[in-house]
């Protein structure tokens, strides 16, 4: 029976080998027709022939893993009488921008070629990739994704590669039409350099780099979106030296392990975690440490989880397979507060004091892309950092923007975004804007995205905080473009980000919790229950205001908050004086704080500051050397704890009861567990009350603290009791890395 169909496929369908795959499948089944890029992430397939139904089945089943189809629409069609199947060039693709494809980890087939089957041209080839894998966003100068628009342009094809590229019979689905096609003969070269940039001539630079790492040296290794700093993870002295050189006393380092088997020796990996670790996105996944793990405790001090990931290039595989341990520290090649290096110039200028050698290659990096980070919260994967593998895939919103827009996100661990119609395109993870380089990086990437998506006369949207650098950048753009600026309250934007992520278009109750966001009243918010109706919201409940001595300084010196809480709840002079030993200053600082908690200039309702205070009270963390440190350590300390009896109406009363339990000799883990779970219970209770009074059945939770297992557990318990559902963002980080999505979603309502 000769049938004809027209198929519309929507999703990541460009730059991932979709059209060549479709052609080869159609050829195999002897079908006539065409495949055409419609732009806007949409591909049209027309096909006719006896085996058209088989094609549809195969398309569902055999599709290569990187191709994420959001939608597949099949319509019966008129016969056009086509006997051959062709890939058609498309006019409309130029008008409607395509999705910039994210970077993908090397696929199993390519790895097999590198390790054994690749023959003379691909065995041991360090840059092996195909239609279904390899770098994309990191190396793209401009759309469309054609070789001359990428870093591959510098590498003219050899005859054999050209043969594979031009013919489906020779190239197969993986190499026919593949823009990044290359082999040992024509691909990039690897060199080993000293920190002055001088080449060290060795037969095999990768093997030599592995030997250097084994010898205790620290080596910068060029990857896909930037440089890693690699070092032995098993030697305390090496890890301590790396910490000293990076000026990073406590912040955890990620560990790259050769394969799942190796990773299983370090951390516990269940099925879901294994799937994530092996996915084409290949993120760093935070997983529970094994007691007998050979990793030095200095790699992630005070935490119960290790950040582990698997290699995603042939170079990384071959490097790791030649090291002694088969796993190494692989942390971003940056210095304190600055973005990761993605050029050799940067490495030689900024990392010369951090690393001893550089493993360099000559495939240029256009976009700096950090590794993505995922963790599990109450058993569900949550994104902490959205970079390589995920960005810049767009997120489809339930609502459309009336005009194109640019969103500037927040200031810490942030990302920006551009929006067109119903698509929100978040930039890759940018970082903290307090260094000039990071600020510039956000500006550069936003400009690139705006150009790439043809955005003209955009609406601009940013936070409300007058001190934010992202707001400053937004206003600079406004002046340059004469554009209108919208400002969205931080926690309102967090709530809307969750709504956009989940696809909620009705009013809802939000629990919006984090370290700090600028409130409408000028105070530092962060433990908020909101009732959100699009561009409007009502703050129905919040954590009780407590003084924040020294403003921002209280976040950096968490003992200040402990003293503030102790003053607010218990007036226990003895305990207050005990806490002063965690302050870096002298008696004067203490005096100043005591004065300021009585006549405060600024108050906070932040859950982050509450967690900080408990963390210091318990001696779990004394200082904050990286964002979220006391809260993360408090979460680690709660493992194995159980719930103590408390009966509190707000977090100040809760703090008072925790102090009482401490005095009665309760264990650190029980108090840590109770503090976090009950903070969640409080929020859940108040969110339920709002839901009831407004007739809502749904609570959305977001903000940086929405990744905490115990808080989420507490909220969910209460929500279950009162019969409402709880939703959390999945595609974006709940913290400031996802804020820009909420800012864009806001604009769909105004
Ligand atoms: Zn491949
Ligand atoms: Zn070649």
Image: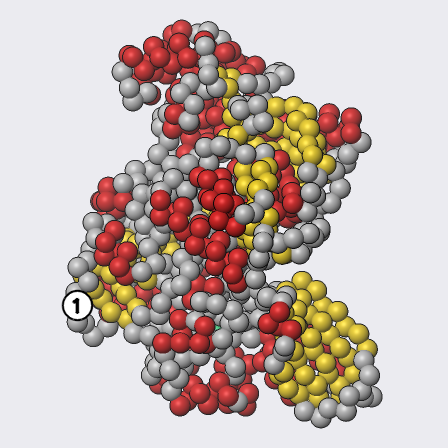
- Please state the horizontal and vertical placement of residue 521, each as a whole percent of the image: 57, 23
Residue at screen point 68% across, 25% down: 540
Q: Look at the numbered disc 1 and say if its residue's Cβ is closer than 8 Å to ligand 2.
A: no
Residue at screen point 71% across, 93% down: 83
Q: Is residue 100 above or below residue 7?
A: above
Q: Mark 1 points at which residue?
A: 200
Residue at screen point 70% across, 43% down: 749
Q: Give the camera-side residue of 656 and 532.
A: 532
Which image quadrant is residue 544 in?
top right
Residue at screen point 44% across, 87% down: 162
- Please state the horizontal and vertical placement of residue 388, each as a whole percent of the image: 47, 58
- Observer able to see residue 438: yes
User: How would you rate the neighbour count of disc 1 (Cα within 10 Å): few for under 14, some for 14-19, many for 20 or more?
Assistant: some
- Please state the horizontal and vertical placement of residue 125, each as a whole percent of the image: 36, 76
- Observer able to see residue 641: no
Q: Give the camera-side residue of 728 and 593.
A: 593
Q: Which colour scheme is used?
A: secondary structure
Position of the C terminus by quadrant: top right
């Amino acid at each position: 029976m000769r049938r004809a169909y027209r198929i519309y496929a929507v999703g990541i369908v460009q730059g991932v080998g979709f059209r060549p795959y479709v052609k080869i499948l159609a050829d195999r089944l002897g079908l006539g027709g065409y495949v055409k890029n419609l732009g806007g992430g949409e591909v049209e397939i027309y096909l006719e022939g006896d085996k058209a139904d088989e094609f549809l089945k195969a398309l569902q089943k055999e599709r290569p893993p990187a191709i994420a189809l959001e939608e597949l629409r099949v319509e019966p069609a008129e016969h056009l009488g086509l006997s051959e199947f062709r890939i058609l060039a498309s006019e409309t693709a130029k008008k409607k921008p395509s999705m910039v494809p994210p970077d993908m980890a090397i696929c199993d087939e390519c790895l097999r070629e590198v390790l054994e089957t690749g023959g003379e041209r691909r065995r041991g080839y360090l840059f092996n990739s195909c239609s279904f894998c390899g770098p994309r966003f990191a190396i793209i100068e401009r759309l469309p994704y054609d070789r001359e628009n990428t870093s591959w342009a510098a590498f003219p094809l050899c005859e054999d590669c050209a043969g594979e590229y031009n013919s489906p019979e020779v190239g197969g689905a993986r190499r026919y039409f593949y823009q990044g096609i290359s082999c040992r003969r024509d691909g990039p070269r690897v060199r080993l350099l000293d920190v002055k940039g001088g080449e060290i001539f060795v037969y095999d630079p990768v093997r030599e780099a592995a030997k250097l790492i084994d010898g205790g040296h620290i080596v910068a290794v060029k990857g896909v979106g930037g440089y890693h700093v690699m070092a032995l993870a098993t030697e305390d002295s090496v890890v301590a030296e790396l910490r000293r050189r990076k000026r990073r006393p406590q912040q955890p380092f990620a560990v790259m392990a050769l394969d799942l088997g190796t990773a299983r020796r370090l951390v516990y990996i269940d099925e879901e975690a294994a799937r994530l670790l092996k996915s084409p996105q290949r993120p760093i996944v935070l997983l529970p440490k094994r007691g007998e793990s050979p990793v030095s405790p200095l790699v992630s001090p005070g935490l119960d989880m290790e950040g582990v990931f698997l290699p995603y290039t042939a170079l990384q595989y071959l490097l790791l397979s030649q090291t002694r341990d088969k796993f190494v520290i692989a942390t971003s090649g940056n210095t304190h507060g600055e973005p990761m290096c993605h050029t050799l110039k940067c490495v030689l200028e900024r990392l010369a004091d951090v690393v001893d050698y550089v493993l360099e290659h000559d495939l240029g990096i256009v976009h700096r892309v950090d590794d993505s980070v995922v963790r599990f919260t109450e058993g569900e994967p949550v994104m902490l950092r959205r970079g390589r593998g995920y960005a810049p895939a767009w997120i489809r919103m339930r609502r459309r923007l009336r005009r194109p827009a640019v969103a500037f996100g927040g200031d810490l661990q942030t990302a920006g975004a551009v929006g067109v119609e119903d698509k929100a395109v978040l930039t890759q993870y940018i970082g903290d804007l307090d260094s000039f380089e990071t600020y510039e990086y956000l500006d550069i990437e936003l400009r690139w995205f705006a150009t790439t998506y043809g955005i003209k006369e955009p609406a601009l949207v940013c936070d409300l905080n007058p001190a934010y650098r992202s707001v400053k950048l937004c206003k600079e753009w406004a002046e340059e473009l004469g554009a209108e600026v919208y400002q969205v309250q931080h926690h309102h934007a967090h709530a809307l980000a969750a709504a956009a992520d989940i696809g909620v278009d009705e009013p809802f109750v939000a629990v919006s919790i984090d370290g700090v966001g600028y409130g409408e009243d000028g105070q530092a918010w962060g433990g908020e229950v909101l009732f959100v109706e699009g561009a409007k919201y009502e703050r129905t409940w919040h954590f009780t205001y407590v003084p924040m001595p020294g403003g921002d300084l209280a976040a950096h010196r968490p003992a200040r908050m402990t003293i503030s809480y102790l003053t607010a709840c218990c007036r226990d002079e003895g305990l207050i004086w005990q806490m002063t030993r965690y302050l870096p200053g002298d008696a004067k600082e203490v005096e100043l704080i005591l004065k300021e908690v009585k006549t405060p200039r600024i108050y906070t309702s932040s859950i982050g500051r509450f967690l900080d205070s408990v963390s210091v009270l318990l001696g779990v963390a004394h200082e904050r050397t990286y964002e979220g440190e006391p809260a993360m350590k408090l979460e680690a300390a709660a493992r194995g704890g159980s719930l103590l009896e408390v009966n509190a109406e707000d977090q100040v009363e809760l703090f008072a009861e925790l102090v009482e339990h401490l005095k009665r000799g309760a264990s650190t883990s029980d108090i840590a567990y109770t503090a976090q779970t009950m903070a969640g219970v409080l929020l859940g209770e108040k969110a339920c009350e709002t839901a009831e009074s407004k007739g809502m059945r749904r609570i959305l939770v977001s903000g940086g603290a929405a990744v905490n297992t115990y808080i989420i557990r507490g909220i969910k318990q209460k929500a279950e009791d009162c019969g409402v559902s709880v939703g959390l963002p999945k595609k974006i980080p709940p913290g400031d890395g996802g804020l820009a999505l909420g800012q864009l979603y806001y604009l769909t309502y105004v």
